[in-house]
Amino acid sequence: MKIDVGGKRVCFFILETIKDNTGYIPCMAVEGEKGYYLTDWNWGKDIELAEKCAKKKNRMLELTEADCLKIVGSTMRF
């Protein structure tokens, strides 16, 4: 299964600062688009578990960790 937005790859990641009182909110990066999007999901209060969920979701999207680093890096434009 692959998700793309207008031909651009999408990946999920966790930021330590993006959470509410119930836990970490997954972020979504779209390749080549500045910034990131918040999902309306919550992957719990344990950051390690939340990161495992993001990695699992990305594997389901047929993305390697290197792919995800490239996608997230491509969103960091000034």
Image (spheres, rainbow, N blue to C red):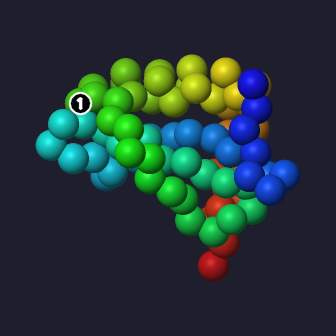
Instruction: Report the side of 47 relative to 4 (left or right).
Output: left
- In the picture as drawn, the residue positioned furthest to the right comes out as 7
Task: Name the residue at 45% across, 29% down.
Answer: 51
Q: Provide the residue designation for mark 1.
A: 45
In the image, residue 57 above or below residue 13:
above
x and y percentages locating residue 72 in the rendered image: 64, 51
Q: Going 58% across and 26% down the picture, which residue do you hit?
A: 57
Say left or right for 14 vs 6.
left
Q: In terms of image quadrants, where is residue 24?
A: top left
Q: Give the image location of residue 40, x and y in percent.
A: 38, 45
Left or right, 56 with respect to 33, comes to: left
Determine the residue positioned at 67% across, 21% down.
60
Q: Is residue 14 above or below residue 56?
A: below
Helix, strand or loop under label 1: loop
Name the residue rendered at 47%, 22% in the picture. Answer: 52
Q: What x and y, as percent, mark residue 33?
A: 68, 65
Vertical position of residue 40 compared to residue 76: above or below: above
**Structural crowding at the residue carrying mark 1, measured as other residues with C-alpha within 10 Å and reported as few (<14), some (14–19) or many (≥20):** some
Identity, as a three-letter code, of the amino acid under mark 1: Lys
Residue 74, visible in the rendered structure: yes
From the top left corner, tell me how far across and down residue 29 is, in percent. 61, 51
Q: Nearer the viewer, residue 41 or 66?
A: 41
Question: In the orientation shown, which residue stands out farthest toward the bottom?
Answer: 78
Where does the C terminus fall, quadrant-wise? bottom right
Q: Is residue 5 above or below residue 11?
A: below
Q: In which quadrant of the rendered image does the N terminus lie?
A: top right
